[in-house]
Amino acid sequence: MNATVSQTQTQVEQPATPTFAQGHRPQHSTVFGFHNSMAVQDDIIQLASTTSNNFDRFAEAVDRVNIDIDSLDEKIDNLADNLVATRGDVAETKDRVTVIEGKLTGIENQLVTVDGRLYPIERSIGTIELRLINLEVDVAEIKTDVAELKTDVAEIKTDVSAIMELLKERNSRRSSRASSRHSASRKSSVSPNLKSTFIFHSPPHEAGPSQVNLSVPELLEEGLRRNQDSRKAHDEETKIWGTLARKLSNVVLRKSSRTDDQ
């Protein structure tokens, strides 16, 4: 403040005439001295007015500075409060981040646990898929075996029917031969010209028994023919029985091989 006052004082215009401050005494004995005294008074009045104005301006400046300082202090206080609040928010944010990190660590541990549980499940699913594929192959093979078995059963039925027909025919022939031998033993007579009378029973699909008169050679020929027919029927029957046995054996082998694969 003293520096400001001194600076203000230096700006005051100095009077042209000497003053008391300069070590001169006033001269009142002359008119010129009177005029000098009046000039000095005017200078003093002007100096006082200028100094007062300067002091008023200085006071206004000081007031403005005080107002600015007060506003600055208020701003600094607000800034300090904001800094304190910011520090609290930062601390709270750090706490929340710590909590979130803990939760994330727990989630990671759970994911690792779930991954560890999922791996055996994936292996089990792969095993199940492989078993399903094998099962599909087995089902396809079973379907094929069933189709073949149906075909075999149909063929076996046909063979059995043929065998039954052959058995019926053979039984009919046996009964026919037995009846023929029985009739020949009772009714046959050998004539001087070697003629014999026999009753031959016809096969089941023909008419009833027929009576023929044959010589001995013709009788032997007829017996030989019928024996050959009987052997032929027997061979056919044996062949059919062999085919049936082979087909049944194939069915059993397929069934056993499928059981071993399973």
Image: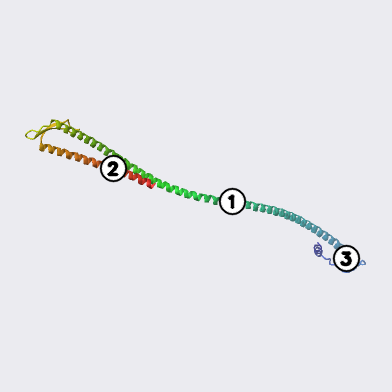
Q: Quadrant of residue 143?
A: top left
Q: Nearer the viewer, residue 23 or 262?
A: 262
Q: Is residue 225 above or below residue 80?
A: above
Q: Secondary structure at mark 1?
A: helix
Question: Rounded to the nearest whole Å, what is the CA distance between mark 2 and mark 3?
Answer: 170 Å
What amino acid type should be assigned to the residue bearing mark 2? Ala
- The residue sitting at 21% across, 40% down in the picture is 234
Q: Check whether the beta carbons of the residues at disc 1 and disc 2 lie within 8 A of each other.
A: no
What amino acid type should be assigned to the residue bearing mark 3? Asn
Q: Which residue is mark 3?
A: 36
Q: Earlier in the sequence, mark 1 or mark 2?
A: 1
- The residue sitting at 42% across, 47% down in the picture is 131
Q: Earlier in the sequence, mark 1 or mark 3?
A: 3
Question: Percent from the top left, x then y, of residue 96?
Answer: 64, 51
Question: Percent from the top left, x then y, of residue 108?
Answer: 56, 52
Q: Secondary structure at mark 3?
A: helix
Question: Rounded to the nearest whole Å, what is the CA distance between mark 1 and mark 2?
Answer: 73 Å
> Which dot marks residue 106?
1
Q: Which residue is mark 2?
A: 245
